[in-house]
């Protein structure tokens, strides 16, 4: 082979390898007006279901933002998180970051039923998750944005990837940056998307180590405000039930605002992964936290941009995947009655967010 040709082929092969390791984004193929003709009322249909549920369960708004996040970080925004266990699928719902933690699966099915009644075989479950995240933000008095649409649903799930790709509440800043970077998201995206913790709840089991035995030291996390520490210890006694809920934002727990960042400034972030954004010495995240706290409009703008960016990760479009008729199963799946029960239904309604 000609030496120059050999170099060219080698370079192209390397490029393919590099690109293959990056999250695939098809944002140019998504369009906020995708359903303008085929299902023009889809946004209002999704909003009505969520609005009614949130009247009695305000936590559901945070839960839907989290569902979209946990979906997109595992093989892309393809609704793989919604697939139940079957003879051929090991559900991502059983992954450690999701098990006894994710909420809203039954509500997704209610939304899907309402959408199917209006527009059969038209709107994907992946798009329902993306729309629901935006609508949840708005219903909590947060920002709105035009959601790019046109995603299709996956035919597979990947529990091992869910275990590997989803950061946890005890993640340090280095780990958080690594998880976000592998999805094509930068430090500003990390801080902005973490701001979703301005609403929702967290179980004691996900932060109790900070209260009594941080990093196996036998002592509390030194970055916790001492008064806040006492409050959390009263709520979550050592050895007590791990399912008791605490507000992620102790100031305005049901309102989407910038108070999350002011909490970090006074060492009142509930999860270690929250407080790390401000308490990690010399980190570039500190200035971003300060800027978002000082300017809520800036936070909202960055949050909107980061949500759109995240929503473009690894999407399926065109002839890829399918439009599921039921969000829990691929089309044509043969399932037993046991599989019809969502994992959430067996959790007695106790979970984070």
Image (cartoon, rainbow, N blue to C red):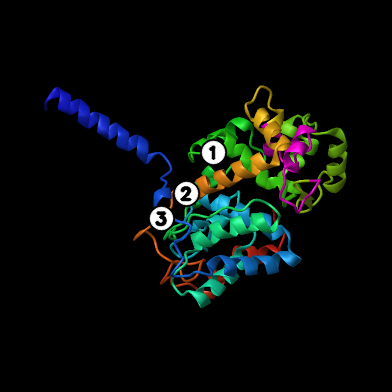
Image coordinates of residue 320 in percent, x first then y, are 36, 58
Q: Dividing the picture into quarters, in which one does residue 121 lie?
A: bottom left
To which quarter of the image does residue 230 belong? top right
Q: Which residues are magenta?
A: 250-277
Which comes sooner in the sequence, label 2 or label 1?
1
| Residue bearing the label numbered 2 | 312
SS at mark 3 in the image:
loop
Q: Residues within 10 Å of mark 1 (few under 14, many from 20)?
A: some
Q: Which residue is mark 3?
A: 316
Res. 289 visible in picture? yes
Residue 30 percent across, percent down from the top left: 43, 54
Instruction: Confirm whether the magenta stretch covers residue 251.
Output: yes
User: Is residue 168 in view from this perspective?
Assistant: no
Residue 255, disc:
none
Q: CA–CA distance between discs 1 and 3?
A: 20 Å
- What residue does disc 1 label? 180
Distance of label 2 from label 3 (alpha carbons): 10 Å
Q: Residue furthest bottom?
A: 117
Q: Residues within 10 Å of mark 3 (few under 14, many from 20)?
A: many
């Amino acid at each position: 082979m000609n030496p120059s040709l050999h170099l060219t082929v080698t370079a192209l092969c390397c490029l393919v390898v590099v690109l293959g390791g990056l999250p695939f984004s098809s944002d140019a193929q998504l369009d906020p007006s995708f359903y303008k003709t085929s299902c023009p009322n889809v946004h209002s249909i999704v909003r009505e279901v969520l609005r009614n549920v949130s009247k009695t369960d305000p936590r559901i708004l945070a839960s839907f933002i989290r569902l979209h996040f946990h979906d997109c970080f595992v093989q892309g925004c393809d609704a793989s998180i919604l697939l139940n266990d079957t003879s051929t699928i090991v559900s991502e719902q059983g992954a450690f970051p999701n098990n006894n933690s994710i909420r809203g699966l039954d509500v997704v099915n209610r939304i899907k039923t309402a959408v199917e009644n209006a527009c059969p075989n038209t709107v994907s479950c992946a798009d329902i998750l993306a729309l629901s995240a935006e609508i949840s933000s708005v219903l909590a008095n947060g920002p709105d944005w035009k959601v790019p649409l046109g995603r299709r649903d996956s035919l597979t799930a990947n529990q091992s990837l869910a275990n590997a790709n989803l950061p946890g509440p005890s993640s340090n800043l280095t780990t958080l940056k690594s998880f976000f970077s592998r999805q094509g998201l930068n430090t500003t995206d990390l801080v902005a998307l973490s701001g979703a913790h301005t609403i929702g709840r967290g179980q004691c089991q996900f932060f109790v180590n900070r209260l009594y035995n941080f990093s196996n030291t036998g002592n509390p996390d030194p970055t916790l405000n001492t008064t806040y520490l006492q409050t959390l210890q009263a709520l979550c006694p050592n050895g007590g039930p791990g399912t008791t809920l605490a507000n992620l934002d102790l100031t305005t727990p049901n309102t989407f605002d910038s108070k999350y960042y002011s909490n970090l400034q006074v060492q009142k972030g509930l999860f270690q992964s929250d407080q790390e954004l401000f308490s990690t010495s010399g980190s570039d995240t500190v200035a971003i936290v300060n800027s978002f706290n000082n300017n809520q409009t800036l936070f909202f703008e960055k949050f909107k941009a980061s949500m759109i960016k995240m929503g473009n990760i690894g999407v399926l479009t065109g002839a890829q995947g399918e439009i599921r008729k039921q969000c829990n199963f691929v089309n044509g799946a043969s399932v037993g009655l046991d599989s019809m029960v969502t994992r959430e239904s067996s959790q007695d309604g106790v979970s984070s967010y």
